[in-house]
Image (tube, grey):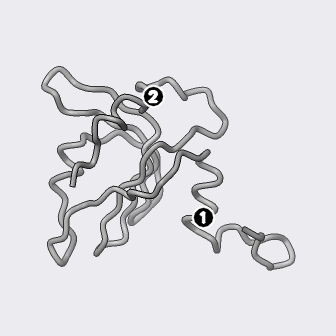
Amino acid sequence: MDLLPEELKKTLPPLYSQESASSPIIHAKFFTPDAGWTWLITEGSEEEDGDWLLFGYVIGLEEEWGYFLLSEIASIRGPLRLPVERDLWFQPWPIDEVLRRERPTAAVGREGAQDER
């Protein structure tokens, strides 16, 4: 699978362009189908060697913002040796909304009821 096709490369904001945004826009979602890891991509820039340095929010053993190379993501295999995939149906959304959908139990209100979707 092409994790970063040409049309996505053209629309992906360059690194640091959403730095001051209170809720940056996620432009792509990568995931391991057999390991429960997710990468939510906000920005990226092509490196001199042709690789892409990406920035986004990673949900794995912990959750954190970070930088990662496209080549590193493409080389990852889960326990069943399945490669990382790109969510083909993902549409750009603010991170707050994406996280609410990714982790619905985190959207619990004060009364213990889940927010409506």
The answer to the question of whether label 2 and label 1 lie on touching residues, with beta carbons closer than 8 A, is no
Find the distance from the CA under tag 2 to the CA under tag 1.
Answer: 22 Å
Type of amino acid at the residue the image marks with label 2: Pro
Marker disc for residue 58: none
| Quadrant housing the C terminus | bottom right
**Under tag 2, what secondary structure?**
loop
Q: Establish if 40 lies above or below 61.
A: above
Q: Which residue is mark 2?
A: 13
* In the image, residue 51 above or below residue 79: above
Q: Residues within 10 Å of mark 1 (few under 14, many from 20)?
A: few
Give the residue at mark 1: 101
Mark 1 element type = helix
**Left or right of 116 on screen, residue 82:** left
Residue 31, by quadrant, is bottom left
Q: Position of residue 71 (x, y in %)?
A: 18, 44
Residue 93, image x, y percentages:
59, 47
Q: Residue at x 35, y 35 (%)?
A: 7
Image coordinates of residue 29 in percent, x first then y, are: 41, 53
